[in-house]
Amino acid sequence: MDKLIEYLPILIPIIVLELGLMIAAIVHILRHKTYRIGNRTIWILVCFIQIIGPIAYFVFGRGDE
């Protein structure tokens, strides 16, 4: 338990960043209908893969506005 408390100052910003990216990616997916690769269902599922999923969506999946 002491180790968890010791790492909290590092973990909290990472968790907030991860959740923020995931929410931003899902909102973008739901508002737009065009994607470079894949479809809406695939990208929503990918966004739940830790921090890598949302970053992958913004780099590879996000279509032209």
Image: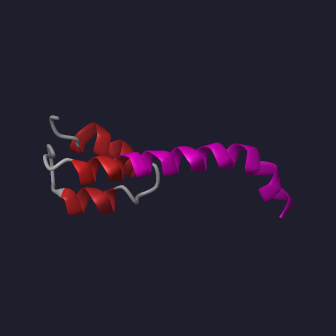
Q: What percent of the width, then of the height, locates residue 31? A: 24, 49
Q: What percent of the width, then of the height, locates residue 52? A: 41, 48
Residue located farthest toward the top when viewing the structure as drawn: 65
- Relative height, residue 1 to residue 6 (above, below): below
Count of marks overlaid on the render: 0
Q: Does the magenta stretch include residue 62?
A: no
Prevalent SS, magenta region:
helix
> Would residue 21 be found to the left or right of residue 5 on screen?
left
Q: Nearer the viewer, residue 47 or 3?
A: 47
Residue found at x 13% / y 46% = 34
Occupied quadrant, residue 41: bottom left
> Would residue 22 be found to the left or right of residue 38 on screen?
right
Image colouring? secondary structure
Residue found at x 59% / y 45% = 14
Q: What percent of the width, then of the height, locates residue 64? A: 15, 35
Residue found at x 30% / y 40% = 58
Residue located farthest toward the front when viewing the structure as drawn: 31
The magenta stretch is 1-24
Residue located farthest toward the right when viewing the structure as drawn: 2
Q: What percent of the width, then of the height, locates residue 25? A: 35, 47
* Quadrant including the N terminus: bottom right
* Quadrant including the C terminus: top left
Residue found at x 20% / y 47% = 32
